Amino acid sequence: MQNVNMTEKRHTMPARDPSERCSNFCEVMLGYDEETAISEARRCLNCKARPCMEGCPVGVMIPDFLALVAEGKFEEAYEVVRRTNALPAVSGRVCPQETQCEGRCVRGKRGDPVGIGYIERFIADRHMQKNDCIPRKTISNGHKVAVVGSGPAGLSCAGELAELGYEVTVFEALHLAGGVLVYGIPEFRLPKEIVRRETEELRACGVEIVTNAVVGRSFSVEELMKEYGFEAVFLGTGAGLPRFMGIPGENARGVFSANEYLTRINLMKAYEEGAETPLFPARKVAVVGGGNVAMDAARCARRMGAEVTVVYRRSAAELPARREEVVHAEEEGVRFRFLCNPTEVLTDGENAAIGLCCVEMTLGEPDASGRRRPKPKTGSEFTLEADCVIMALGTSPNPLLGRTTDGLQTGPHGEIGADGAGRTSLEGVFAGGDAVTGSATVILAMGAGRRAAKAIDEYIRRQACHSEPRRGE
Ligand code: FAD
Ligand code: SF4
Ligand code: SF4
């Protein structure tokens, strides 16, 4: 074993200068080099109890892969991560590591936790740079599974099943695979080439991806099973239905849901000359909300050349967005108006947004979420000038599948009812990710996809017990 690096501070990752980056969509964080990755990996104590692993929803063998990186065995380390994590270059970039693996790292008790995510990103990027996608299709076991939705839940479920020998077809409503990874999270945080490459790795494992296929419209879940011969279906349809405030003027021109705004930019590349789905050049943008989605929308709007203000009804201390995202937004010139809440979108004679009426708030007693409940301050109304207002208030699962699938139980917000293993009220139909939990995280969705893959395998094996033996066995 190599000498442990007992430095309390972790190696910082170089980042693009704020003055340069706020006018383009290039990736902000630039990644570790080999030497830095090795030195950071040597900070790991290789703890016997492996507390960091308890914080990882997909059970990455963290001490094992770090030990390999510490010895410069990068490709071997990649293989260890890849055993449980289908998208390491993605998770290394967007996992909220501070509350997951790194949140449990013992080095964090005195100093910084080991930069697990940064190192994971490094080995995944290095693998992509050094290797073409190598086909590694497992021998087919002759059983067919359909996956609906190509977000992290669907892709992780598909990858896991393909490794077990299943013939997996992913049906995706959009023209590109990746879910929020392609249409929501901006290029400057997660380059789309990375998502494409990790999706290619899955294709190389034998996963078929059919795009422009809306299940519930193009064909139903029942048809997939009865007519197309899929023995099980996994529903990983996400939570893409935006919420609005219900205030006057919200249907004005220039008011967007964060989902629509981000989709125009990330999926449809509205920032490129001659884009087919452009955005009008807004001067002053108000973003309502305080989560990661609000930060992404605000930072995109800055890059589109606008002055941007984030309007949040609680104080800076309650901002739900990751600290790193808030700091980056501030560095890029995004302004924040804390403790204020919109009451109306002001419009001109042609129903175009021209301003956002707001009221100041104070914080009262904690509510059910444990956060202090904001209350309006009487007589504190004011108006922000804004020709574009972006509502980033959260999303719910799309109700389409609930409405078109007989017997599929759904909750009050359209969430598909499923147990911890992803089993739904319908035999052979499984679900996971945001479609079940509501908006959560990439790695929780991937964990749900993995668990459902195991349950699907058990289910099909049980069914097959009473019929002929499986091919390849
Ligand atoms: P999704 O990623 O939503 O994928 C669902 C897919 O299903 C979509 O491609 C959709 O088109 C498709 N689909 C839906 N209905 C159908 C149908 N009927 N037929 C066929 N296909 C269908 N999480 C993090 O961990 N870190 C972050 O930094 C982060 N940033 C985020 C930023 C934004 C802007 C957003 C919106 C979310 C962010 N999240 C982040 C949350 C994270 O992206 C989601 O929790 C995660 O993507 C959920 O994965 P999923 O597979 O369940 O759903
Ligand atoms: Fe940490 Fe996410 Fe990697 Fe798990 S997948 S080790 S939580 S960065
Ligand atoms: Fe290494 Fe931290 Fe995990 Fe211990 S808790 S094995 S130091 S990463």
Image (cartoon, rainbow, N blue to C red):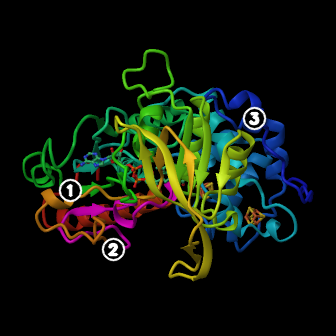
| Direction left: furthest residue | 227
Q: Which of the two discs, 2 and 3, sits closer to the camera?
A: 3
Q: Name the amino acid, label 3.
A: Pro
Q: Callout 1: helix, strand or loop?
A: helix
Range of the magenta residues? 419-443
Q: Is residue 318 visible?
A: yes
Q: Is residue 161 magenta?
A: no
Label 1 packing within 10 angstroms: few (<14), some (14-19), many (20+):
many
The quarter of the image holding the N terminus is bottom right
Q: Name the amino acid, label 2.
A: Asp
| Direction top: furthest residue | 274
Q: Which residue is mark 3?
A: 18
79 or 413, which lies in front? 413
- Residue at horizontal 78 percent and vertical 70 percent from the top: 106
Q: Callout 3: helix, strand or loop?
A: helix
Q: Within 8 Å of ligand 1, the CB of disc 1?
A: yes
In the image: residue 396, left or right of residue 72: left
- Residue at horizontal 44 percent and vertical 47 percent from the top: 346
Q: Callout 2: helix, strand or loop?
A: loop
Q: Is residue 435 magenta?
A: yes
Q: Which residue is mark 2?
A: 419
Q: Kindly identify which numbered label has been placed on residue 382.
A: none
- Residue at horizontal 38 percent and vertical 58 percent from the top: 247
Q: Position of residue 59 (x, y in %)?
A: 56, 63
Q: Within 8 Å of ligand 1, the CB of disc 3?
A: no
Q: Kindly identify which numbered label has been placed on residue 401.
A: 1
Cα–Cα span, label 2 and label 3: 45 Å
